[in-house]
Amino acid sequence: MIKIYHNPRCRKSREGLDILEKSGKEFEVIKYLEDVPSKDELKTIVTYLGIDPINLVRKNEIIWKEKFRDKYLTDEEIFDAMITYPKLIERPIVVKDDQAVIGRPASKITSLIE
């Protein structure tokens, strides 16, 4: 099953959702600001993406700049920050089987679901 971690207020996330809708494939929409992923889910996503947790963080968000920038954070602390402030999670994230992409640019989603 394909999943998209989606923020309806984000243009890139809406573009990603549009790609999935046009694909005709079944998928699940997870509005991650309302249904915050667990730490285990985030760890799995990071593993599927093949990145370090810090690379899943939107570092230009005001919350990040005010609370975390210039601080050394362990991976666990980064996961905790994303759970406490889900707006920090990069978007959209599309997961299929044991693979995932951050849909920036949205064409990455197409390559994952084909």
Image (cartoon, grey):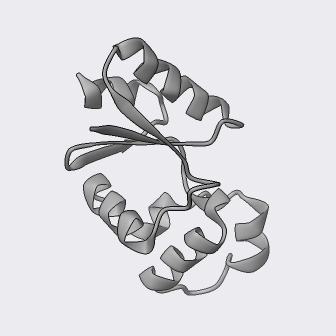
Residue drawn at the location 64% of the way across and 54% of the way down: 33
The correct choice, above or below, for 44 with respect to 20 in the image is below
The correct choice, above or below, for 92 with respect to 58 in the image is above
Instruction: Check the picture and name the quadrant holding the C terminus.
Output: top left
**Position of residue 42 measured from the top left corner of the image (x, y, whole percent):** 41, 65
Q: Tell whether 21 sits left or right of 2.
A: right
Instruction: Check the picture and name the quadrant holding the N terminus.
Output: top left
Residue drawn at the location 20% of the way across and 50% of the way down: 98
Q: Tell whether 109 sits left or right of 16.
A: left
Residue drawn at the location 46% of the way across and 27% of the way down: 106
Splitting the image into 4 quarters, where does residue 47 fall? Answer: bottom left
Residue drawn at the location 50% of the way across and 27% of the way down: 17
- Quick check: can you spot residue 70? yes
- Quick check: can you spot residue 59? no
In this rendered view, identify the residue nearer to me: 48 or 104: 48
Q: How many marks?
A: 0
Splitting the image into 4 quarters, where does residue 53 fall? Answer: bottom left
The correct choice, above or below, for 25 with respect to 59 in the image is above
Splitting the image into 4 quarters, where does residue 10 fall? Answer: top right
**Position of residue 32 measured from the top left corner of the image (x, y, whole percent):** 56, 52
**Position of residue 100 measured from the top left corner of the image (x, y, whole percent):** 31, 45
